[in-house]
Amino acid sequence: MDDLLADFVAETREMLEASEGEIIAWEADPSDKSRLDTIFRFVHTVKGNCGFFDFPRLERLSHAAEDALAEVRAGRRVPDAALVTAVLAIIDRIGEMANAIEQGQELPEDGEDALIAALEVNAEIELNAMGADGAVDADNDAADPVTPSKSANNAPDNAPAVQRSIRLPVDLLDRVMSGVSDMVLARNDLAHRLRQAGNQPTIDGPFERLTTILTDVREAITRMRMQRIEHLFGAFPRLVRDLSSELYKQVMIDLEGGGVELDREMIEMIRDPLTHIIRNAIDHGIETPSERLKNGKREIGLLSIAARQSGNKISLVISDDGRGLDEAKIAEKAVANGIISKADCDALNREEILQLVFEPGLSTAEKVSSISGRGVGLDVVRDNLEKVGGSIRVASTPGKGSLFYLQIPLTLSIIAGLTIEIGGQSFALTQSYIEEIIDLANGNFEFSNAGETALVTFRGERIPCLSLAEVLGVEAELAFDKQVLVVLRMANGDMFALAIDRIHSHGDMVVKPLPPAIMATKMFGGTTLLEDGSPVLLLDIPQIAFKMGLVSDARSQTFPSVDAVPAANTSTNQHVMMFTDFSGRSKAIRLELVQRIETIQSDSIEGDDGAVRAVVAGEILPIIGLPEEGDENAKQPSGKVRVLRLSDGSSELLYAVAKVQDAIELTGDLVAVDDVPFTEAMTLVEGNSISLIDGHAIFAKFGSTPRLVNTLTCLLPDSDWAKTMLAPLVSSAGYRVTHSAKSSADIVITLDQDAPSDVGISSSGLSVIQLRSQPDTEIPKADRPHSIYRYDRDGLLAALRLAGKGEAA
Amino acid sequence: MNELLLIATVAGRRCAFHATSIRSVIELGKITPIPGTADMVLGLAAMRSQTLTVIDCARVVGESLAAQDGEPLPADARAAVVDVDGYAYALAVDSIEDIAESASDVSKVLGGFGKKWAAVAHGMVETSDGPALLLDIDQLVSSTTRTDRAA
């Protein structure tokens, strides 16, 4: 069932349960005003929700009850037993209908008119017929107009087992959740101790089981509270569409990071603030299409919302490419509205003035529109966010757009992280920030300095490079050129590289908040325990970037402008990965093909010439690029081998290289070569000629065949030979195998059948392939074409292909 | 009167904590240093899968006896584990003597205890083994952030 609907039913039922006591008390004393109010609120809420969900009958009922109760509240009507009964009957009916809705049934048939009629003042006569005091005794009186209440009482009992939901206090969930995270930590501790104690089968078994259970429970618990932020994002495209058409603007919305999970409660808390910021952006930020064209922008404005998780915080960046905030106007307004004195205002820098938009009573819009601009807004947004421990900041470039940077806390979370080492100490990094990891010892990267800032060239862009050792004020163990660079991408799209000593491992981490004394460093977002029980600090990347001045105000990089994207695609410059092969030659391969760079053990490579395979990450893949045996010039690989994992989208293969160099952009002309196998072209890179590997050719030759989408079925003889020898061959050729004559098959393979028929398509459209046990030399020449020797692999495969083609045609 | 106190030595002086606020006393093992914090914050330690922030009490009162700069803590360094505002801290002290009963109310001393001591002390209490300075755990912990701001 729809989430919203389930919520509605749950809420209705909950209110029903809560108001039951009130209803009975009201029945005992109809003049009790406070009881009346409770019941009135209930029907009123139901009425409101019904209108929203389009349940006209439910709405009519609750509306009638509301009307009658409103009369009583206004003192125009005296509550009597008849009215009480009628209202109660309606409330029962609402409960009944809620059950029906939950089970997806039609609402129970009519009787509503009678119920509503019973509410009328002149309905007394009718009701009097039912009993002396008009007490709810409907169950005993079948002729009574309020009988539907009978079925209402029974309905829940008959309810089939639908997925029921219960509501729990958030506190309780919190407690369970922190209990489970502590259990995970305790388990890790125990795991460490068990490892120290050595193998103990009697303990290891149950411990494994405990681990599995704990993983399950943890996942369930996490899901209990978490919701993907998509749920919140889902409503935005519509909101943007409606607003922009109302304001005669064209706005495109770009949502990123929908997979970030957030506490359900937190999602509710940020719904209004986000909506408000979006409204503001469209109303004030983004210009009309004509104005945009005049300013040299695309007619369509861009609004982008990106969510990232970082430690126990979620960062949300909402940016638009509109006219930006007008600093002078904000300052002027702030002074005029008495928010700040002129002298104070003059002392502020642009950044600080911009933050004044969050002060109460400031609106820079000249006209008050129906959408926003009444000066109640951003202050409320900030208050609401601060209430939940979040923060908001605005940055803006005049004419270019503005950027709202929100941070919302997660009290406790489990994140995917990476442990790294610098200066002999371990730290953790949130994995979602990591764009790429570059081993400096393994390739030459272009570094340059702009003033004091070190820059590294990464995929053709110069990005700032920070030394984590410097940031933290510790001593790095390795020289810079031996370090590892972690390229990080911030929520707003800015990138920077962080130089660290080495990478340890990655895994799930339970992040716990840090005490204020450590938070004050503004470098750490939380702490987590490693498997060996030692605590590590989680680096707060946004804070570090902000502290080092790496967060740009210009939102130009938040998403590449739409114009730029097709331009990049049509550009003739191609990105390639440069590497050195085992003969010491530099070669290049298109970057798009390179999936990953892996390191494998040389003993995991096996096979004889032509069909060498290697095991990587539990998969067996063909491997090429290895030096030929006996090649004197080539350096034979030993120990660890670097391989490029290539993929054409459906199949994968490995390319062994001696050394990975760098990813570069090809600028020189490509000179096609025909005579060198597997080489597409030659080109010049920094004056040296480099051969570009022909991806098409290597995949054509070595790529493992992707499975046919529409697999053909082969019916094989029901013999041991067919099962053990033939079936694997046929299925590895990409055909489904069956032995049962009853199942439908596209191709039939027979063995030593007496009645010889032609290889190929039989009259029924079924392809039949005949196999025989005698080799070609042992049978008359004339009989040979009719059947295939059963160990003639090539012949069989050719026949299968032929049959398959006939099928496809 | 007759309150249970944990008697410890901080920077060579006899001090006391309210025993009821102490969760446990642990031997500090490996401490993970935290770059960028005030030097009275020694780092993080783990206790039964819980992370503790280790505060060097001696440094809070301006002395540095529990651990000299750069020197590791003695292997048997002890700390009192306390909870403040939902966070667990380990207060590293020179040594922990015993649990004692207070024999007097908390009292002030003419001339005070010295500025830094006074900031973190409730006052003086008498025990059967002599007087001790009763330390205020909340103040001890919050002094770590205060100094940071001043710096």
Image: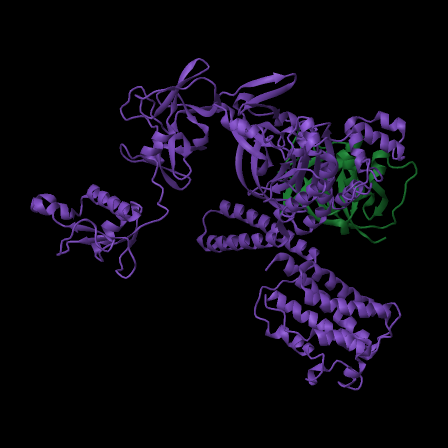
Chain colours: A purple, B green
Q: Compared with residue A188, is residue A438 higher up or lower down, i.e. above or below?
A: above
Q: Is residue B62 visible?
A: no
Q: Compared with residue A204, is residue A407 higher up or lower down, i.e. above or below?
A: above
Q: Is residue A531 visible?
A: yes
Can you give x and y, in whole percent of width and height, for residue A87 in the image? 77, 73
Give the residue drawn at x 79%, y 37%. Answer: B143
Q: In the picture, which quadrant includes the N terminus of chain A?
A: bottom right
Can you give x and y, in whole percent of width and height, for residue A617 in the image? 42, 40
Q: Compared with residue A467, is residue B87 higher up or lower down, i.e. above or below?
A: below
- Residue A125 is left or right of residue A704, and the answer is right
- Residue A73 is left or right of residue A581, and the answer is right
Hey, which residue is sitting farthest top in the picture? A687
- Residue B141 is left or right of residue A510, and the answer is right
Can you give x and y, in whole percent of width and height, for residue B49 in the image? 61, 47
Give the residue drawn at x 74%, y 34%. Answer: A394
Q: Quadrant of residue B13?
A: top right
Q: Quadrant of residue A356?
A: top right
Hey, which residue is sitting farthest right in the picture? B110
Q: Compared with residue A172, is residue A24 higher up or lower down, i.e. above or below?
A: below
Count the labels in the image.
0
The front one of A402 and A503 is A402
Can you give x and y, in whole percent of width and height, for residue A435 in the image? 55, 33
